Image (cartoon, grey):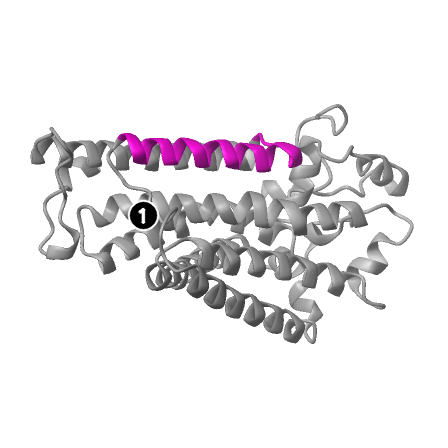
Amino acid sequence: MLANHFRPPRCDNHQVRPDDGISRDETVARVGRGTNAVLGLLALHNLVQNTLLNERGYVTGNLIVSGLLVGVGRASGLTWEEMGLRGGSLRDGLLVGGAASLAATTVGLVALAHPEMLDDDRAAASGDAVWRRALIRFPLGTAPFEEIAFRGVLTAFLRRAHPAARAEWLAAGAFAAWHLIPTGRALAGNRLGREMSPPQRLGAAMAGSAAAGVAGLALSAMRRGTGSLLAPWLAHSSFNTVSYLTATAAGRRPGSRRRKATAGRGLCPPTRPEPGTDSMLAQLDLNAGGGDQHQRACRIPAGSLGDVFRDTGLGCFTPGRRPEGFS
């Protein structure tokens, strides 16, 4: 357990501070228990989020878990300032976050010049769903939760026991692990990912998770430089929103593969895996019964569990279950 490795750090600026009326050893133990609780809660939520939560429950679930994480931090003696939820420079946060948002927008516009890299089935959605995800899911569900969890509470716990640089690297490692399952599912919904062999997809998923860890280090630098979570939240939400809107725009350009595949067939593109592909992709063969069956398979109520699996790249239905009735 991590609690066994907690010790007073050598850096004087990050010493474990005994709380009022509590001994130093008890404070160290409380921080260790709190860290283990945070890691356990994140692991459980990662599984629930990627298997059970529907589109509507995604934002609510993330907000609830964010509150639980903050509660664990406060119960373990973390201050609001340590978690990045109070203090810091509002001006610096807005400037840094705004600059990062502008950079994300620029990258998105440049990426439109290479639409094949953005040919992602997860971006095949109706207008209402697109704007719901762009304006609600990412800025209010994904970014706040992940910033509170990884740059806020977890980093604050780790800084109680390690120098700041090491704490940020450890938090970035946890952030990379958090993205392993979503990255694998994203590859299943991307044309380039489906053309890979299983070992290649595994390697690509690990590389994508490592890239998320590197992004986590950049977000930690924003958090440290501005003193709050405002800048990383703005940067994170902007990157996710711009990436999604860019992929959506690429798929709707004349001549795009997804536009041709979905013309007259509903929102879900057909997927026919090559012989010998793994079982997960084999379950995505929605064309076995012809166009009518594909059309019926794609009639999933917005916000249903099947909609989430479609959004995460697992196809137009929940494998092994009926696509209807999950709300």
Q: Is residue 66 magenta?
A: yes
Quarter residue 217 falls in:
bottom left
Give x and y (percent) for residue 169.
29, 57
Q: Which residues are magenta?
A: 52-75
Q: Is residue 195 visible?
A: no
Residue 150 appearing in the image: yes
- The quadrant the C terminus occupies is top right
Question: Label 1 neighbourhood size at 10 Å, few (<14), some (14-19), many (20+)?
Answer: some
Check disc 1 and report its element: helix, strand or loop. loop
Q: Is residue 200 magenta?
A: no
Residue at 39% from the left image edge and 62% from the top image edge: 222
User: Which residue lies under the disc numbered 1?
Assistant: 81
Q: Is residue 116 shown above or below 319?
A: below
Quadrant in the picture for the N terminus: top left
Q: Label 1 amino acid?
A: Glu
Give the left or right position of residue 100, taking residue 134 as reference. left
Residue at 58% over, 70% down: 102
Tell me the residue at 12%/37% (across/down): 18
